[in-house]
Image (cartoon, rainbow, N blue to C red):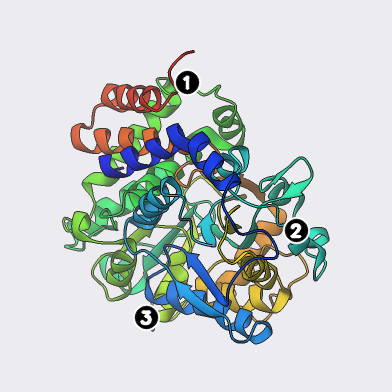
Amino acid sequence: MNRTRRTAVAAVVAGLALVLEACQGAPGGIGAGTKNLEVLSWWTSGSETAALNVLFDDFRKSNPGVNIVNAAVAGGGGSNAQVVLATRLQDNNPPDVWQTHPGASIRQYIDDGLIADVSSAYEQDKLASVTPKEMLQAISKDGKEYGVSTGAHRINMLWFNKKLLAKAGVTVPTSGYTVDAFLADLGTLKAAGVVPLCRGAKAPFATAELFENTLLSVIGVNGWKDMTADQLRWDGPQVRQALSQFGKMLSYSDPQAGALSWDRATNKLATGGCAFESMNDSAYGELVKGGATEGTDFGYVPYPGTDGVFLAVVDTFAVANNAKDPQNARAFLASIGTKTTQLAFNKLKGSVPLRTDVDVSSLPTYQRASAQSFAHDRVLLSISHGEAKSPQFELGFYDAIAAFEQSKDVNAFNQALRDAVNEVQPPPH
């Protein structure tokens, strides 16, 4: 995580009370507004833009004449967008709607009164009754809902180029694939002259997801529960084991990883530039958008050691408490929660609908399987996307991973995590 983002976000955390005070005195209640709607997201890749346009087009059908301002910010897997949002919140000039995640990410905005109650969206199209209970709780406080989610991505996935595996004599991975087998296959690929592991390290979240998946494979569901309850020993043997495995994986990374965004790394896998990629299933949407064929050009398997788990990053939108266009903003959230919009959006995005009543039979094979996992496997929220732990912890997590990548020193990881988390703690009163 770069220092610019840390500074901007920490400034917002420190100044939220001032922002809230300004919001309470700002114009723009439910009766106010214009014929505009500004939506801030970080969706700018080919598949992301196509999926975002589905949301916009479906909204326009029931809200003709509204001018949508697409305020998407490219780069950083959302970190750049969050810097822009932080600055705009400080300036009391928020977008009408912005992208966030459920759990700890959205709760910071709820607790500080920065986003509006959008419970009315859940009264339409039976949304409240068809949203999984844990997902509803993750965007709620005191019985009120503050965001609408478009879909769920599965983070713990491993993608591979089938032709490169065949070239190196590596057996296609299947359910039950282990970390040891994965490391052995990476070594075989390297010996065959194939770049073993794609990694879009230009955006820190891609590397964080790789470590997060490796950590989950070691500590399991119970360990994840301990971690969310602040009971995991970050200097303990399990984390050390995960870091050891992670360090070995990094040694097999594409030498050009630092210059690649996640989507460019995914495209490199599709075109035969590298063999494996650990990435949430945004990769699926990007692979298909780029013309790669599931089952022929690429395959996939749950990340080694994480079968039976759906480690989720859930895309969610919230409405600013002092939105310039509050009616349009609420109407947008109601629109993105409908069955037809969720199906069309997720088909392009690579994710799966959050609604339990969406017929997914028209989705491709991968997404149907992912929907089954989301419905029946253990669903866990992510660290690297600010869901399972606070955004402040997320910043520290990124810094710790970056420190380890540079030094391969477990102690550096733990020290960076402690320092980063302490740095953003409020001063004692």
Mark sitting on residue 290: 3
345 to 307, vertically: above or below: below
Task: Tell me which label, 2 or 1, sits earlier in the chain.
Answer: 2
Q: Earlier in the sequence, mark 2 or mark 3?
A: 2
Q: Is residue 403 above or below residue 425?
A: below
Amino acid carrying label 2: it is: Thr
Q: Does residue 207 appear left or right of residue 283 in this picture? A: left
**C-alpha separation, residue under disc 2 versus residue under disc 1:** 34 Å
Percent coordinates x, y for residue 385 in the rendering: 47, 47
The local secondary structure at tag 1 comes to loop
Residue at left offset 45%, top offset 49% = 89
Image coordinates of residue 255 in percent, x first then y, are: 16, 55
Q: CA distance from mark 1 to mark 3?
A: 42 Å
| Foreground tag (2 vs 3) | 2
Which amino acid does the dot numbered 3 rest on? Answer: Gly
116 vs 367, nearest the viewer: 116
Question: In the visual, does 391 lie left or right of 372?
Answer: left
Mark 2 vs mark 1: in front? 2
Q: Is residue 317 visible?
A: yes
Query: Left of 212 or right of it: where is 75?
Result: left
N-term mark: 1 or 3: 1
The residue that mark 2 highlights is: 131
Q: SS class of the residue under badge 2?
A: loop
**Residue nearest the observer in this picture, 80 or 428:** 428
Q: Which residue is mark 1?
A: 233
Label 3, secondary structure: give it.
Answer: loop
